[in-house]
Amino acid sequence: MPAPAEFLKYVDAQSDAFISRLSDAVSIASISGDPAYRPKVVEMSNWLNAQLQAVGVTTKQVDLGTHVMDGKTLNLPPAILGRIGEDKSKKTVLIYGHFDVQPASKSDGWDTEPFVLTKHEDGRLIGRGSSDDKGPVLGWVNVLQWHHETQTPLPVNLVFCFEGMEENGSEGLDALVVKERDGWFKGVDCVCISDNYWLNTRTPALTYGLRGLVYFKLNISGPGRDLHSGVFGRTVHEPMTDLISLMSRLVDQGGNILVPGVDDMVSAADTEERALYEKLDYSIADVEAAAGGKIALSQEKTTVLMGRMRLPSLSLHGIEGAFAGPGAKTVIPAKVGGKFSIRLVPPQTPDSVEPLVRTYIESEFAKLGSKNTMELELLHSGRPWVADWKHWNYEAAKIATEAIYKQKPDLTREGGSIPVTLTFAETLNCNVLLLPMGRGDDGAHSTNEKLDRSNFIEGTKLLGTYLYEVAAQAGN
Amino acid sequence: MPAPAEFLKYVDAQSDAFISRLSDAVSIASISGDPAYRPKVVEMSNWLNAQLQAVGVTTKQVDLGTHVMDGKTLNLPPAILGRIGEDKSKKTVLIYGHFDVQPASKSDGWDTEPFVLTKHEDGRLIGRGSSDDKGPVLGWVNVLQWHHETQTPLPVNLVFCFEGMEENGSEGLDALVVKERDGWFKGVDCVCISDNYWLNTRTPALTYGLRGLVYFKLNISGPGRDLHSGVFGRTVHEPMTDLISLMSRLVDQGGNILVPGVDDMVSAADTEERALYEKLDYSIADVEAAAGGKIALSQEKTTVLMGRMRLPSLSLHGIEGAFAGPGAKTVIPAKVGGKFSIRLVPPQTPDSVEPLVRTYIESEFAKLGSKNTMELELLHSGRPWVADWKHWNYEAAKIATEAIYKQKPDLTREGGSIPVTLTFAETLNCNVLLLPMGRGDDGAHSTNEKLDRSNFIEGTKLLGTYLYEVAAQAGN
């Protein structure tokens, strides 16, 4: 069931008006991480609420309470819940997006004013939030506008959840999702989130996995205070010697995790899954261009992509308490905390991996024969997520993508985390689809963030078409 | 040839006056490391110059030119050269000391005003510079005062070199020593420096060695910018993985240096030398009290003391460029610089050790098979120094110590550096003796710096007696 041809024509015809609306959205500097901009986030919530109402959505703005930032208690910006369509014979799709943005200022190195949407002749629509995530959110508004103006019923029921704190830990959202599970979100059949990116600049993508995380601080202490290496060198057990030795036992140069059992938890890809990686439109040159150096772990594309998407990884981030400044200070630091983290993939969970790390570190520390004291802290953790990419939700998105882009989408997994994905998947117990609108080079948290005009316009068509293909999957 | 009994009696009788003079000296806040206090350092030079002239010393204050501190060009405080006695039949002893001090303020945690000499009932004379180095410098003035008042000729000729920049790298001094080698310092037979400490609080010491230093920064770079561990974990060679691996190969938990050839350069102590360490009045409890933790590398006193005094040591100080703050940042740092240093002992020199480190690091880095880039920088270096402790200069000090303290002195080597020692030893090509006045717990660069009254008074007797014993060694 393709989208109506009139809808697709309308999107092309209205594209300047759509871009104008995106320009209005970008002009509201809704930076959630800076208390001074909090009124702008509230203004953005009000603006989006009005846009949704104008295209026929029943909404309510939800007070999420307060939080503390920079020592000040602030009101959280209101989330927006929306609903359109109540036809029990149709599937119900929950749409998530966010209307807050990362900080940005010209002095960071932007070529243009970040809060003025600038149309470049190469098609880029440059501005903070253009791609992350105001463009995708307005993509849904674009879709609704045609249906509203033409009084065409939507092929599915839609429920919306838009928040204004995504760039600052989605504070208050988890509680809202749990609270509304049997309320506003009752009867949701699947979720669609458009808040990530294609793997490259050429090929649309559907994303079905995210890695989890366990983040550790490995503390070693011994001396009562920092010591002088002239006076104490070779007389005492130095905490740094112990810490560096332990940190060197965590991961090898090939990226293999040396904590026994961690890599083993993940089974090898079968032929079908491996084929997904072989098909991905990505090269070692793409990896190295993104990293800014010829440092890929392998020259084999599938190996590198699996390393990022379907294998755990262990990174050493740094050391708290050691000498980190410029120059030559001859200190023996008294207490040092090594920071490292492991990105997790199913079936790993923080609960299953953390004891393996603890047992290994304790055993290796005992081998050192050091008189220092060791303590392992778990600073942060999150579970990984992988969706069933053969689910009708993905099938609908795949057919829609092929219809609009005349290309098969890359089926990708992300190496990082979008915590809200897991919240929806687990709380609502349904399939979640990540359906990116933007390209891999959009620079979401960087300078000169952009959304390509064609991604905004074709992306709008894709979102609309996806809804029709979900409806077409109704028999499944 | 013991010192005259009248001299010893005079020192006891004048002790309150001597302490009063020390009090005057401490009240001049001659902090060399703070531009705001530079006039105080100049005032201190003038004050000491007057004190020396008052007891018969011919002096000249020497302009050492300018230097740059905190972006400002400042005049260096004038050094003082002094001379008393020109009898060619007598030995000539060069005395070095410094009249500048470390910064201090009550807010650092001092119990008393740091620039007011406070006499505690337990005998401590508390104040900044009391022990480092105004007490020892005034010890020499005390000795001269009796000879001047009684018109008693000194048993040796004395040459003085007092500076006001010791706590800030002795700027300008090396050039002065070289310049005056065949001028003011011509004919010097030996050097005596009273600017270090007993090993403990009980036993006088003579110090005949200092360790040298090579300080390295091991840089690893690869990515063009800091990367996100979610996106790049297990896809690229991470600089931290390489760096931590290399740093873990430098020293083991027993303090043994793993760079081939470095430990091997130092021959084992022979029976005679080992006996020196066995005789030292020091315990493992002393080491652990000083370190603030039960972390001594061995329970064997001789092993620990040799580790500090006659063996090289390698300490890992920290990492520049890695994540060093609190919290959990999932960064893959693009460029990291590991700081480590090796304390050197004869026959090691920076020139002989640096190539061993470089060859080893290059070879170990090659083994990693990393695509990152490695660079080893030498940030700082200094040669070690060991004097012949059987020289008549030491013999004189030993006899003098036994005469005053009724104890054999500990024969010690320091783990750290006093660069000026090497300057005098090498430029003047003569024996240098370090003859400490203060105790191991004086807290030279710390809060509540003190010199015990008995160390000041008996120390004055020791300095005077040492001169007589040097004269007695004239036949050697």
Image: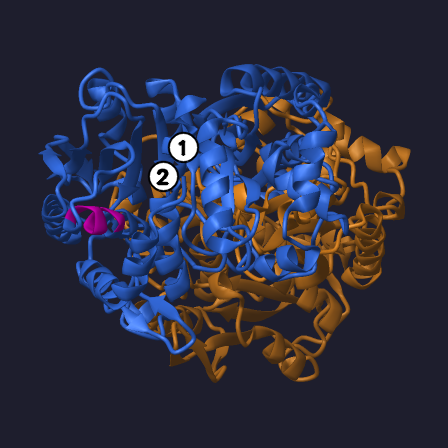
Chain colours: A blue, B orange
Quarter of the image for residue A109 reads: bottom left
Q: The numbered mark 1 sits on a residue in which chain? A: A
- Residue A299 position, x and y percent, is 77, 52
Q: Where B122 sits versus B23, above or below?
A: above
Residue A144 lies in the magenta stretch = yes
Disc 2 vs disc 1: Cβ atoms closer than 8 Å?
Answer: yes
> Can the viewer see residue B139 in this picture?
no
Which mark identifies residue A468?
A: 2
CA separation in Å, label 2 and label 1: 6 Å
> Can the viewer see residue A71 in this picture?
yes
Q: Please, what is the three-letter code of the amino acid marked with disc 2? A: Tyr
What is the magenta range?
Answer: A143-148
Residue displayed at 52% across by 21% down: A375
Q: Where B345 sits versus A348, above or below?
A: below
Tell me the element at label 2: helix
- Residue A43 position, x and y percent, is 10, 51
Q: The numbered mark 2 sits on a residue in which chain? A: A
Quarter placement of the C terminus of chain A: top left
Which mark identifies residue A472?
A: 1
- Dominant secondary structure, magenta: helix
Q: Determine whether, in the image, residue A376 is placed left or right of residue A285.
A: left
Foreground of the two, A473 or B225: A473
